[in-house]
Image: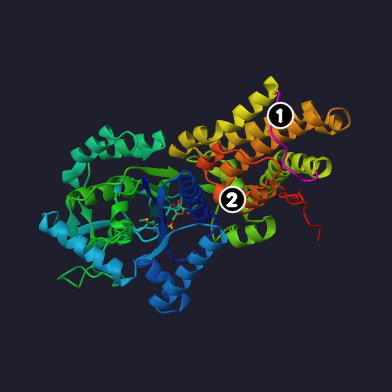
């Protein structure tokens, strides 16, 4: 069984989870679930990034000790993962002893390889981004203040710092991108990163002295490690580093880091440079997705339009929310969140297209065939063959799309089959055949049941609960819901439970 290691970023615990965080986690979850159903040994990691100035400041503002605060907010992220149906295999916290030990060993390894030196940093820093900026990157606002290109406030820092010899890795990084065209996705982001690295790299400050909420630098405890070095190391500490005999270590290197576009550079430039410098293998791929705005506006606390994933799930249900997030926007692009489009997708694509197809097919089986799955017809028409061929081709087509993280294309592919299913049932009209040709009706219903089974099987990663219900109704045993099981047809005569709608229409409550 081949291994597959996939991660989400670890989330800063300076504030509660919102829909942007849920998005990253759900997308990674779909891929993790897909790979499991496709027979891989998956390790799926998420967790929280708990050090740094931003978190320390948020704790201070909340009037709590930093540890109390991080415990609380980390718990909220753990809870978000559970509520969003995220099937992570572990949840890492960077304040854990194992993780701090990993950072220490990594640091010493970099020192031993002469990759770190003591110097000083005089320059701009944005706490909100936990990032350093050059003078020429700053943007002047109409009111004359200068901010980071992300809009974050900046402060001037003059500190003795340890620096990592990032500048020495420019050629090796370019070679890595050249030799591994799949290393960064989507392609637009790849070009951005390559241009950034071609433009030349400065050595990177990797310690701070003006606050203490971080992993102490070995042998120089007046410094704490830069939060990004600490954070990126989570991906190896969770699989046991530095203990390479840890049973999880075989998962390294990661197959896929899913990240938001604003942190692609940390993952595709700094992270492989740290790893190569420490003599460790680099991840196989970093894919970055876009950002959500809300009803056309940037999501922000000050605007008051931050979307709480808990509220969404309570209002619309978990699976419709998961479906919407991945269906509405091509994965990799920016998108806009609106309740109206969510409800439209629920009612059109889930309730009408998929829900009705299943309900119509299954209720005819219940009504006319005593709820028993019919045998495949002895004579098949070209339409039957085309319908089944379209469904049977899905796992293979989706595999290619999931490997490119084209999650929206995967859904579109499934919806083509669902729409073909609706056209097929309308044309064959089994409700009419019930009166004229019972044998033909039975074969039509069998084609539909078989096609629906494939559809429900491949949609499990996106909508695990609803598809489990649909597969129950189709009489598919729980052990036969992985992709390889699709080769075995269900026995005729299988007794199906009474059909019940899986996707009710959503009707807005009028207050
Ligand atoms: N702690 C760092 C990551 C360290 S990984 C070694 C961090 N954390 S974060 O909490 O700020 O963001 C984590 C993820 O949430 C990112 O992938 C980011 O893109 C995502 N999102 C935050 N707001 C978002 C939107 N409005 N839209 C989509 N995703 C966004 O960065």
Residue 418 relative to residue 170: left or right: right
Q: What residue appears at the point 64 percent right and 32 percent down from the top-left corner?
A: 417
User: x%, y% of residue 279?
Assistant: 17, 50
- Which stretch is magenta? 370-379
Q: Nearer the viewer, residue 79 or 300?
A: 79
Residue 181 visible? The answer is: yes
Residue at which label 2 appears: 322
Q: Is 491 inside the magenta-drawn segment?
A: no
Residue 506 relative to residue 469: left or right: right
Q: Nearer the viewer, residue 148 or 412?
A: 412
Residue at which label 1 appears: 377
Residue 208 visible? The answer is: no
User: x%, y% of residue 371?
Assistant: 77, 46
- Residue that sits furthest to the right in the current view: 435
Label 2 secondary element: helix
Q: Does residue 213 sit above or below 17 in this rendering?
A: below
Q: Which mark is residue 166?
A: none
Q: What residue appears at the point 46 percent right and 58 percent down from the top-left corner?
A: 88
Q: How is the image coloured?
A: rainbow
User: x%, y% of residue 452?
Assistant: 66, 39
The image quadrant in which ligand 1 is located: bottom left
Q: Nearer the viewer, residue 84 or 200?
A: 84
Distance Cα–Cα, label 2 vs label 1: 37 Å
């Amino acid at each position: 069984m081949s291994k597959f290691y996939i991660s989400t970023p670890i989330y800063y615990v300076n504030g509660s989870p919102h829909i942007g965080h849920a998005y990253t986690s759900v997308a990674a979850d779909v891929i993790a679930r897909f790979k499991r159903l496709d027979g891989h040994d998956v390790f799926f990691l998420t967790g929280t990034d708990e050090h740094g100035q931003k978190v320390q400041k948020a704790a201070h503002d909340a009037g709590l000790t930093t540890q109390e605060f991080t415990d609380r907010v980390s718990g909220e992220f753990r809870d978000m993962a559970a509520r969003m149906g995220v099937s992570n295999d572990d949840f890492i916290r960077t304040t854990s002893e194992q993780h701090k030990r990993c950072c220490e060993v990594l640091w010493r390894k970099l020192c031993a390889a002469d990759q770190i030196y003591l110097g000083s940093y005089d320059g701009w820093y944005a706490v909100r981004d936990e990032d350093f900026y050059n003078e020429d990157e700053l943007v002047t606002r109409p009111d004359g203040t200068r901010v980071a290109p992300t809009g974050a406030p900046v402060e001037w820092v003059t500190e003795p710092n340890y620096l990592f010899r990032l500048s020495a890795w420019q050629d090796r990084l370019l070679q890595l991108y050249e030799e591994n065209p799949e290393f960064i996705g989507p392609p637009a982001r790849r070009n951005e990163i390559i241009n950034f690295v071609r433009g030349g790299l400065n050595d990177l400050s990797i310690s701070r002295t003006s606050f203490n909420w971080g992993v102490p630098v070995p042998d120089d405890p007046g410094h704490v490690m830069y939060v990004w070095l600490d954070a990126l190391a989570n991906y190896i500490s969770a699989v046991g580093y530095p203990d390479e005999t840890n049973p999880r270590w075989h998962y390294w290197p990661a197959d896929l880091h899913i990240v938001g576009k604003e942190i692609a550079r940390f993952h595709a430039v700094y992270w492989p440079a740290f790893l190569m410098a420490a003599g460790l293998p680099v991840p196989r791929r970093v894919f970055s997705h876009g950002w959500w705005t809300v009803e056309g506006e940037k999501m922000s606390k000050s605007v008051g339009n931050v979307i709480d994933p808990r509220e969404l799930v309570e209002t619309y249900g978990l699976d419709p929310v998961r479906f919407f997030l991945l269906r509405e926007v091509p994965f990799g692009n920016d998108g806009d969140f609106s309740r109206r489009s969510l409800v439209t997708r629920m009612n059109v694509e889930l309730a009408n297209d998929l829900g009705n197809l299943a309900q119509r097919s299954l209720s005819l089986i219940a009504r006319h065939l005593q709820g028993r799955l019919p045998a495949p017809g002895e004579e098949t028409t070209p339409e039957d063959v085309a319908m089944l061929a379209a469904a049977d081709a899905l796992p293979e087509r989706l595999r290619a799309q999931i490997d490119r993280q084209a999650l929206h294309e995967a859904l579109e592919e499934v919806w083509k089959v669902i729409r073909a299913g609706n056209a097929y049932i309308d044309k064959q009209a089994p409700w009419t055949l019930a009166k004229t040709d019972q044998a033909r009706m039975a074969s039509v219903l069998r084609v539909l049941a078989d096609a629906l089974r494939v559809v429900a099987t491949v949609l499990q990663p996106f909508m695990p609960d609803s598809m489990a219900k649909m597969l129950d109704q189709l009489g598919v045993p729980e052990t036969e819901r992985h992709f390889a099981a699709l080769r075995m047809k269900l026995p005729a005569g299988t007794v199906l439970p009474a059909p019940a709608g899986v996707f009710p229409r959503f009707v807005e409550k009028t207050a």
